[in-house]
Image (cartoon, rainbow, N blue to C red):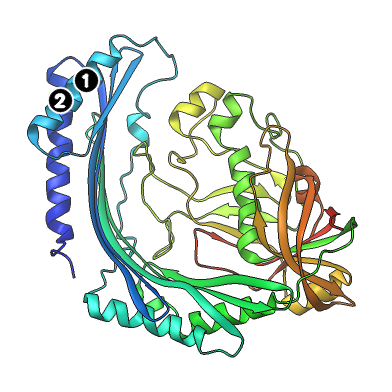
């Protein structure tokens, strides 16, 4: 479908480029240097109303060089893999470093923290697929959805497949490489009734194409979700329990991680500054990171600083147990890196799990939120206000769809008000979570 992608060959080429850049930096006077290089190749197929809309083939590469001259830092990057371009990037990074201000926190992570164990994370699963085969899968997905009675039209189905290699090295002598792949299939459908049109979607995503759901099941699920939204009403304004669907609950975890990220903390731009050890969640809730989980979406033996990754517990029995720190942010805060340069990897919730139906029954009367809109989350104050759509629940049963309303609260209260986590865990991303039931939030509707 595209030119052959030899991951082993690409890894060797990238390692050579990284070593070349590190050697040049040493030769030209840098006290320390770190280099990241990557190459990715992929294909995207989009179909709509039974016709091929686009076939896109991509191949991207890049190299980024950061040098340290004393406590001065300079960075430069290029998408050109030629020797001349690498020379130019190193030269410019050193020139920039000589004119920047000193930063006592700058520099590489300590040498003794560099990753030593480099197991195969089993995250590279190439998909040998012709263009015709990819088109057939996308068309089958869309057709399964379009054939459902009540579906008016399609907004398209898409298949994407890609693989790549990344290499990181620094002047401690560390060089680490990882190969990876990502595949997905999605479908967006439209239905209409007297009240107007509704639109919804579903998708499947995995490292290994063998773990993707079949195209027909994705199309059928998208159709069912779309039809379920017909006849939407605006809910009344008030304070009610709110249940977040799994994908949206993962978003709440993401807001937590953003608030405990080192960059937000040393800038004093987080509502969780100086909160280590405090209770945020019920005591039955624990959130941990498992970066060495085999085959998972974000697995890696080393972080963006080359530091050996490890299991971290960010929330331990409801209490904030750890911040999420890179080497730089740790120095700014007077702490130790948590091997999280580049973010958290494979977040998992350890909590008693409740069935979906039991969570609805526990809520009794409230709103199941299945879609959120807008960016109304203030990481400094924790204030949360977003447009939403979902379903009205009465006597523990879904009654009808609702839309055009806002849910609001504060993340402190939302976390503390978590009363249940569902066993309907969404495993399609790096954050695995089931539904979350929150005791009470403000609903602004009709």
Secondary element type, mark 1? helix
Which numbered marker is on residue 92? Answer: 1
Query: In the displayed structure, does residue 411 sit left or right of residue 78?
Result: right
Point out the image quarter for the N terminus: bottom left
Residue 342 on image: x %, y %: 43, 41
Query: What x and y, as percent, mark residue 248?
Result: 64, 59
Residue 305 percent across, percent down from the top left: 36, 36
From the image, tell me which residue sits under label 2. 88
Q: Which mark is residue 45?
A: none
Of all residues, the one furthest to the left in this rendering is 83
Residue in front for this viewpoint, 59 or 334? 59
User: Which of the 4 image quadrants contains residue 78?
Assistant: top left
**Residue displayed at 50% across by 39% down:** 338
Q: Quadrant of the C terminus?
A: bottom right
Task: Please rate how many residues cluster around mark 1, counting C-alpha atoms within 10 Å: few if below 14, some from 14 to 19, many from 20.
Answer: some
> Is the Cβ of the residue at disc 2 closer than 8 Å to that at disc 1?
yes
């Amino acid at each position: 479908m595209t030119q052959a992608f030899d991951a082993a060959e690409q890894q060797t080429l990238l390692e050579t480029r990284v070593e070349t850049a590190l050697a040049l930096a040493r030769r030209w006077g840098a006290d320390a240097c770190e280099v990241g290089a990557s190459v990715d190749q992929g294909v995207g197929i989009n179909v709509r109303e039974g016709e091929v809309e686009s076939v896109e083939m991509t191949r991207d590469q890049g190299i980024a060089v950061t040098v340290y001259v004393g406590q001065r830092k300079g960075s430069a990057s290029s998408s050109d893999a030629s020797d001349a371009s690498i020379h130019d990037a190193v030269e410019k990074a050193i020139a920039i470093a000589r004119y920047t201000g000193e930063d006592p926190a700058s520099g590489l992570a300590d040498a003794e923290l560099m990753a030593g164990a480099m197991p195969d994370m089993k995250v590279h699963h190439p998909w040998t697929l012709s263009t015709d085969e990819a088109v057939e899968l996308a068309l089958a997905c869309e057709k399964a959805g379009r054939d459902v009675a009540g579906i008016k039209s399609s907004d398209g189905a898409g298949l994407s497949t890609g693989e790549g290699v990344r290499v990181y090295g620094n002047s401690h002598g560390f060089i680490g490489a990882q190969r990876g792949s990502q595949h997905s299939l999605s479908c967006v459908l439209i239905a209409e009734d007297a009240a107007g049109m509704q639109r919804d979607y579903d998708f499947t995503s995995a490292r290994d194409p063998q773990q993707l759901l079949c195209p027909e099941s994705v199309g059928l699920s998208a159709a069912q979700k779309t039809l379920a939204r017909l006849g939407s009403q605006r809910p009344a304004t008030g304070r009610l329990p709110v249940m977040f669907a799994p994908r949206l609950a993962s978003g709440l975890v993401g807001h937590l991680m953003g608030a405990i990220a080192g960059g937000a903390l040393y800038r004093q731009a987080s509502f969780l500054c100086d909160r280590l050890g405090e209770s945020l969640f019920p005591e039955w809730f624990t959130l941990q990171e498992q970066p060495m989980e085999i085959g998972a979406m974000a697995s890696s033996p080393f972080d963006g600083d080359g530091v050996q990754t490890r299991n971290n517990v960010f929330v331990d029995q409801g209490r904030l147990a750890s911040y999420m720190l890179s080497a730089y942010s740790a120095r700014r805060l007077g702490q130790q890196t948590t091997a999280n340069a580049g973010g958290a990897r494979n977040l998992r919730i350890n909590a008693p799990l409740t069935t979906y139906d039991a969570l609805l029954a526990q809520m009794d009367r409230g709103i199941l939120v299945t879609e959120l809109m807008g960016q109304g989350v203030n990481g400094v104050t924790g204030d949360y206000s977003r447009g939403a759509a979902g379903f009205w629940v009465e006597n523990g049963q879904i009654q009808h769809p609702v839309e055009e309303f806002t849910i609001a609260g504060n993340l402190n209260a939302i976390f503390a008000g978590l009363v249940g986590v569902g066993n309907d865990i969404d495993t399609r991303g790096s954050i695995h979570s089931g539904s979350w039931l929150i005791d009470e939030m403000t609903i602004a509707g009709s």
